[in-house]
Amino acid sequence: MKPINLYFLTLLIASLVAMPLHAQSRGIGLEKKPQEARTPYTGGVYRALIIGNNVYRDSSGHWPSLQTAASDARAMQKILRQQYGFSDTELIENASRRDVLKALERLANRALPNDNILVYYAGHGFIDETRQRGYWVPVDAEGADNTTFLRNSTIRDELNLIASRARHTLLISDSCFSGTLLRQASRGISQVSNSEDYFKKVSHKKSVQIMTAGGVEFVDDDYQSSGHSPFTYFLLNELKHNDRELITLSELSHNVTRAVANNVEQTPESGVLQGAGDEMGEFIFIRLNLTVDGIDPENVGVEVNVQPSEGQMPRQNSIRIESQPNRFSPGEAVQPHLPMPTL
Amino acid sequence: MPFLKINTLLPLLLLSLSMPVYAQNSLNLGVLLNATGWRGDNGAGNSDFNSDKGGQFGLSASFSRDKFYTGLSLQGGEYTFDNSGPTQFSSGGAVSTTSIKVEHNDFDLLAGYYFWPQVSLFLDLKSVNSRWKNNGYEQGFSGLGIGVAGYNPLNDNWTLYGSLGFVGGTIKEENNAAIGDAGSSALIVGFNYALDGHNHINLGLKSRNYVFDYDDGNQQEYSLNGLFFGYNHVFGL
């Protein structure tokens, strides 16, 4: 074959290689890629570790199984991925003590300096009233032996490590007595503003925030047979019906607290993790709103490319329509590291 | 590199490195072994030629920022022709060659941009140079080419990738005298395997085709086709 004749063959082959392999649907190009939001003005990735403990193994019956913790966790993962651009989420159902610690370690290893990291826990909690110590109760907890629990100080240590590596860190704990995580740390509701200057300011400042289902009281499991705890029910509700593109944790917490307190004997609390470097920044949720005719919403995600240029609001940035990913790739570059093409 | 002025290339490289783009910076250094054969046609009434030994070694460095990339690549090697070799079509007349060794070098300076999620377009300032070792005669061409590159991930580790492009330029001898026009095309189809986030190996097929149209009416076509194997190390910046 003369070299010149290879042109047409090579053009055909290269075109096939270069074409995205995914189907077209009603004129909208779809590709497999993690949906992704980036921190306004700083460009970090949104990551989440979500834990939901339903099935407790304790043979003594000290820790009965819960009805809604796992579904709370699944619903949180779904809404964070689909509507808030969390591109790296890890969901663990029925986590043992080791599972929780290993997952926190993995999350800390993935954390990058501008990242937004959310840890969500739904499951049993415990308070040692004589020592005023709070705990998460993993599924392999053994009766009242609190050495098999996860002590708040351990959780705070792990959160401290994550917070030392990321820009914004948020712990949401939906368990009994979770308010003990907030000991000496409550900040209450800070300034709430919709101005660009405000979002820019709190986006650049480091934050290490905590939001809990209650103070030091018992919290309900299944709210009005909704399949969710009251706290997570109203949290999901607030996230789902939020019509603002940017919402800070303080504002979200304010709304959720009011809704929960108005409906059940339980008062969520929020604040900062003491000693973890919080600079009065804010964890900002970015609402990504998108529907595509003819495509199951489960299979639609979005990526918002937020350019961290001065004076630009995220709402002005481009939105690209993409299908749901089949795997996540935390921290991966937009393009893979391939050899440079040459002629 | 007689046909490409470094004082032209350097500002271009610096300019491309300084373009205002977004995060995700990486530096990619690569080495490449190219088991190519050199075969071609010296034109009507002249002999064909086919190398008996030879291959190329390549080095590359590229920098990428988000959807933008730029870099340079140098590939070169020596080929042995036991019988007919590529004819020297020079301003002094044609010189047929047999039982000779010829060096063939390619230098590329390019910049590209992912206009689509998995497909990029790139510009390549390319210089090709051949040196006949029997008498030291050199000629080559340089010009600006355009190409398209794309990839498709197969799983967590393997990625299929490819590129295709064309370059046109003027044939010049070592005294910088223009003696014709030349063009080349290149096709790469390969697989990249990510050993981890920083280390990658790649293998595939690379085909380069060259056409030289000399002002005296002679034409020479040849191709360098073969398998390649490479290693790349990526530094996050």
Image (tube, rainbow, N blue to C red):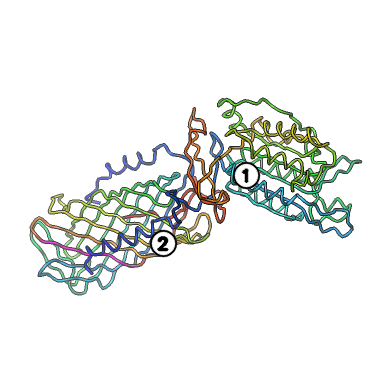
Asked if residue B114 lies left or right of residue A108, the reply is left
Residue A223 is situated, as x and y percent measured from the top left of the image, at 78, 44
Q: Is residue B219 magenta?
A: yes
Q: Residues within 10 Å of mark 1 (few under 14, many from 20)?
A: many
Q: Is residue B61 magenta?
A: no
Are the residues at dot 2 and dot 1 in contact (C-beta closer than 8 Å)? no
Residue B99 is situated, as x and y percent measured from the top left of the image, at 19, 72
Query: Compared to A271, does B3 lie above or below?
Result: below
The amino acid at mark 2 is Gly
Query: Compared to A299, does A269 lie above or below?
Result: above
- Disc 1: host chain: A
Q: Specify the principal SS of the magenta part.
A: strand
Q: Residue at x 25, y 45 (%)?
A: B5
- Residue closest to the eye, B28 or A317: A317
The amino acid at mark 1 is Leu
- Disc 2: host chain: B
